[in-house]
Amino acid sequence: MSFDLSLIVESVPMMLAGIGITLKLLVVSGLLGLMLAICLLLMRISGKWYLNIPAQIYIYIFRGTPILVQIFIIYYGLPQFDAIRESIFWPILREPTGCAILALTLNTGAYVSEILRGGVLGVGKGLMEAGSALGLSSRQKFIYITAPIATRLALPAYSNDVISLLKSTALASTITIADMTGIARTIVADTYAPYEIYMSLAVIYMIFTFGIQKLFGAIERYLGRYTKREG
Amino acid sequence: MSNEPLIQIRDMNKFFGNFQALKNINLEVNRGERIVVCGPSGSGKSTMIRCINRLEEHNDGHIIIDGKELTDQIKDINAVRREVGMVFQSFNLFPHMKIIKNLTMAQQLVRNISKTEARKTAMEYLEKVKIPEQADKYPIQLSGGQQQRVAIARALCMKPEIMLFDEPTSALDPEMINEVLEVMVELANEGMTMICVTHEMGFARSIADRVIFMDAGEIVEEAVPTEFFDNPKNERTKEFLSQILTH
C-alpha cells in the first residue's frame, strides 16, 4: 500500500482548525462536570437518604449507559418533546455543541463524583475526630480538612478522567460537530485515505494527552508537597 | 468558681450494637484533679473519655461538664468541646497544614481570634512544648514525639478547662516517650484538670491524684496511686498489675 505524506502535511492544519471546538468541549464540560460532581458528592456523603439515593440512581444511569447513546438521546430524542422545545433550555439543546457539552457534562459528572468520593473516604477518621475535638463544625471540617486532603488523594484518578473526557469529545463528531475528529471524517470522505488521516489525528490526541499528564503531574507535586519528609 | 465537680458522669451506659462497652459508669472529677485510667485493651477506657467530648455518644445516664449537661443538641456539644481539649494516640495533626496553621486554625474558626493573636498564642505554646523552631514545617517532617507535643500545644491553644489524653505515648518509640510525659507532668503541675488513659505507671504514680482501673466496661477499682499500686483490692486489678509490672 502507498503512504501519502503530502496528504498528512495538508490535512493536519485542517484538523488543527478544530482544536478550538475540541478544547471548548473539554474545558466547558470538564468544569461543569466537576461542579456537578461536587454536588453529587455532597449528596452522597450528606447522610440523608433523600439526597443520597437520587445521587446514586443518577450515577448508576450515567455510568451504566454508553456516552454515545446519551449523546443521541439528548440530540435526537429530546427535541421530540414540545415541553423541551418551549423550555428555556431550547437555545442550548437546539445546537449540537450544546447537546454534546450537556451529554459530556452529565457523564463526566457521574464518574468524577465517585472519584472524589474515593478521595473523601481516604481522609483519616482520626483527623475528623481531631477537628471535632477542637470544636470545628461539620462544614468547617469539610472545607478545611476533608476537601484539601481528598483533592490530593483523588487527583491521579481525576486526571485519568480528564484524559478520558478529551477522547470522548471525539464522539461529538457524530452529531455534526466539526471538532478535530469531525474535520478528519470530512477529509476522509473526500480523500478516501483513512489510514493517513486517522493516524495523524491519533497523534494529535496523544500530544494533547501528554500535555494534560504534565499539567496534572505538576499539580500533584504541588498538592503533595506536605507528604515529603524533606522540606 | 463553684465547688461542684468539673466533670460528673452518672449512671452512664454505652452500647456498640448489642455489645455493652460501658456499664453503669459513675465518675466525678474536681477542678485541678489528675486522673489516670488504666485497664486491659477493650476494657472501655478510651470509649469512656471519648464520651466526655462526644466523640462517642452515650446511650443513657448523664455527663455534666462544668454544670452543662451533654445532650444531643449541637449547641451543648460545642459548649462542652470548647472546654475540653483532647490528645490522641495517633497525634492526628492535619498533615496538609504547617505546624503553626495546625495551632491557629481552630482558634480563628471556633474562637474568632484574630490571626495575629492566634499566632502569638500558638508560638507561646510551641515554646512551652519546646519546639518553636518547628513552626513552619509540615507534621511529617517532625518525629513522633515532636508531633505529639504539637498536638498537646494545639489542644492547649483553645484554652480548655480539661485535657483528655487517650494513650498519648502508645504510638511512640521508647526514646520519645519521656519528652511527651515531661510536657504532661508540667501541665499537671500547673493545675490542669486531666484525665489520662495510659499505661505509663511511673507517670501515674508521680502525678495522679487517683488511678481508675477498668475492666469489661466497668470501673472496677478507684484509689490514690500509693493505695492502688501497693495495696490493690480487686482480683482483676491485682492480675492486671502483676502482668504489667513484672516485666
Image (cartoon, helix red, strand yellow):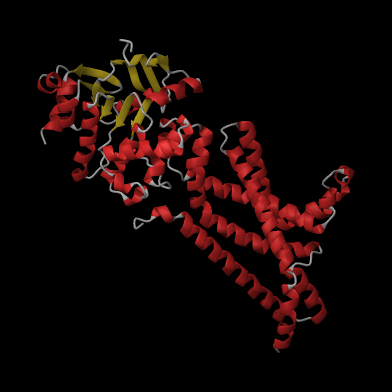
Q: Residue B58 at what x, y percent from top left?
A: 41, 20
- Which residue ends up furthest to the bottom in the rendered image? A2
Q: Residue A201 at what x, y percent from top left?
A: 68, 74
Whether residue B148 is visible, yes or no, is yes
Residue shown at the point (18%, 45%) measured from the top left: B175
The foreground one among B95 and A94 is B95
Residue shown at the point (75%, 72%) measured from the top left: A17
Work out which quarter of the rendered image holds the C terminus of chain A and state it: bottom left
Residue shown at the point (28%, 16%) measured from the top left: B30
Whether residue A63 is visible, yes or no, is no
Q: Is residue A174 above or below residue A131?
A: below
The foreground one among B183 and A185 is B183
Q: Is residue B219 above or below residue A54?
A: above
Instruction: Report whether B216 appears left or right of A63.
Output: left
Q: Is residue A202 above or below residue B183?
A: below
The foreground one among A55 and B77 is B77
Q: Residue A94 at what x, y percent from top left?
A: 85, 53
Residue shown at the point (15%, 27%) measured from the top left: B206
Residue B31 position by quadrant:
top left
Work out which quarter of the rendered image holds the N terminus of chain A and state it: bottom right
- Which residue ends up furthest to the top in the rendered image? B3
Residue B88 position by quadrant:
top left
